[in-house]
Amino acid sequence: MRITKRTNIAVRLLMYCAAHPDRLVTKSEIAEVCNISENHLAQVINQLSQLGFLTTQRGRNGGMCLGMAADAIRIGEVFRHVEGNLPMVECFADADNSCPLTDACRLRLALRDAAQAFYASLDEITLDALVCDNTDLLKILNPVVCARQSVSQAG
């Protein structure tokens, strides 16, 4: 099974927002840190905001943040919504299926079961579990440190 670029971008975007919970983040900073085209990112931002995973604010001081708590965002749900009903194999597509074996194919059933198990496994993972206490990830995502914390840590 191959995950689409859109889903990959969606998860990176959500992780970035989860790593910056106390402020609005911008499309340009996410694009730079996560190595994503701003055009692709804009499409995913729109989709995730429509689904309620993100809240966006337009304008000079605009940006985005998570639309719900990170521990309420299940990665399986994100994958299902973003991947949509893309068929894993030709025989899963109603219109474009030209396989003559479809009606008798046991592999089709096995693949359907495997896909369901894949999503069920991802349902066990929250966005919070991907980000919380993941110091290596947080270094990469470079969260902004509050000036007060820097001063108190130095002293």
Image (cartoon, grey):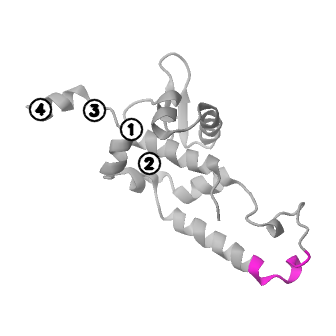
Q: Amino acid at mark 3?
A: Val
Q: Are marks 1 and 2 in contact (CB under 8 Å)?
A: yes
Q: Are marks 1 and 3 in contact (CB under 8 Å)?
A: no
Disc with the residue nearer the chain's start (1 vs 2): 1
For mark 2, give the secondary structure.
helix
Disc with the residue nearer the chain's start (1 vs 3): 1
Q: Which residue is mark 3?
A: 145
Q: Amino acid at mark 4?
A: Ala
Q: Which mark is residue 70?
A: 2
Q: Does residue 128 appear anywhere in the picture?
A: yes
Disc with the residue nearer the chain's start (4 vs 3): 3
In this rendering, position of residue 106 left or right of residue 71: right
Question: Looking at the magenta stretch, what is its main secondary structure?
Answer: helix
Position of residue 41 measured from the top left corner of the image (x, y, whole percent)? 59, 36
Q: Which residue is mark 1?
A: 21
Position of residue 2 measured from the top left corner of the image (x, y, whole percent)? 64, 61
* Camera-side mark, 1 or 4: 4
Q: Are marks 4 and 2 in contact (CB under 8 Å)?
A: no
